[in-house]
Amino acid sequence: MKIGIVGGTGKIGEGMAMRLSRIYDVLVGSREIEKAQDTCESCLRYADDNGLSCTVRGLTNQEVVDGADVIILAIPYKHLDSTIAGLHGLEGKIVISPINPMEKHDFFEYIPPTEGSAALHLKKILPESTRLCVAFNNIAGNRWRDIDGELEYSVAVCGDDEESKLIVMDMIDRISLLKSYDAGPLTMSPVIEGLTALVNNIAKCNHMKDVGVRFV
Ligand SMILES: NC(=O)c1ccc[n+]([C@@H]2O[C@H](COP(=O)([O-])OP(=O)(O)OC[C@H]3O[C@@H](n4cnc5c(N)ncnc54)[C@H](OP(=O)(O)O)[C@@H]3O)[C@@H](O)[C@H]2O)c1
């Protein structure tokens, strides 16, 4: 299975690429192909230094959409509309949204769009046949990038297409110590996205770093 990361050069994208490329063919996307290739070189260098194998290619975001079976949209919410408007060929693809529309002033605040969440907005602007799932919203970028550390977290996954949700959950369960949980339909996305503001405020108020979530 080919996993594409649109915005694969960013804070979560790069760490995702490093970890996922040990397991899957990973296509790292960027608006600038050179940036994507730099990220791939980091992945390959790390794998080489540690005697690991990794399969990763740096491409434009459009080439990622063209080549991947599963596409992670690792871009900030404020750039979501322009990014989707500039891409074609998302029909029938599995798309994962880790996107949290959030602002930080004194504290972190979840500020969803009028549809109720980034994912519900995304559903409106994606082609009808795109199979949208929400996942990875509550794992800090620093944890993805701490490549020698295990990711001992739960991942809530929601979506309206049961088959694609199972594919995404299976993919998650192969990454480090992550454990996926079916969180129901896409209407659960405001809760999953908003949870990130909660864990970030818990981290801030309790002098903790990169707090995550585990369901036990
Ligand atoms: N950071 C976290 O800890 C974390 C945790 C959980 C979920 N998330 C969510 O994951 C998503 C990505 O977060 P992030 O922190 O990784 O974001 P980021 O590092 O700020 O940005 C990710 C990528 O977005 C692309 N980008 C920047 N400006 C753009 C524009 N104007 N148009 C299109 N693409 C643009 C850039 O890629 P190129 O310049 O290469 O195109 C950049 O590397 C967000 O929605 C966030 O809410 C983040």
Image (spheres, grey):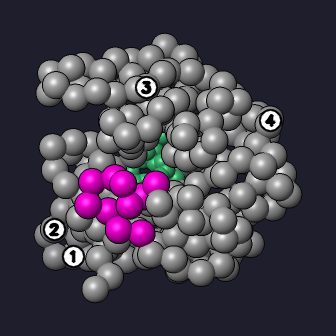
Mark 1, residue position: 205
- The tag on residue 67 is none
Q: Is residue 45 above or below residue 115?
A: above
Q: Is residue 51 above or below residue 1?
A: above
Asked whether residue 93 is drawn in magenta, I would say: no
Residue at image point 14% right, 69% down: 207
Which dot marks residue 56?
A: 3
Q: Which is in the foreground here, disc 3 or disc 1? A: 3
The tag earlier along the polypeptide, 1 or 4, is 4
Q: Please tell me which residue lies in front, 112 or 121.
A: 121
Tell me the CA gap for discs 1 and 4.
42 Å
What type is the residue that disc 4 sits on? His
Task: Residue type at mark 3: give it.
Answer: Val
Quarter of the rendering containing residue 215:
bottom left
In the rendered image, residue 19, in percent from the top left (x then y), is placed at 32, 41
**Residue mark closest to the camera, 2 vs 3:** 3
Q: Are the residues at dot 1 and dot 4 in contact (C-beta closer than 8 Å)?
A: no
Residue on which the image places disc 4? 88
Q: CA distance from mark 2 to mark 3?
A: 33 Å
The answer to which of marks 4 and 2 sits earlier in the sequence is: 4
Can residue 117 be seen by looking at this rendering?
A: no
Q: Is residue 175 magenta?
A: yes
Residue at 48%, 22% (x, y): give it: 57
In the orientation shown, which residue stands out farthest toward the bottom?
216
Amino acid at the residue labelled 2: Met
Residue denoted by label 2:
208
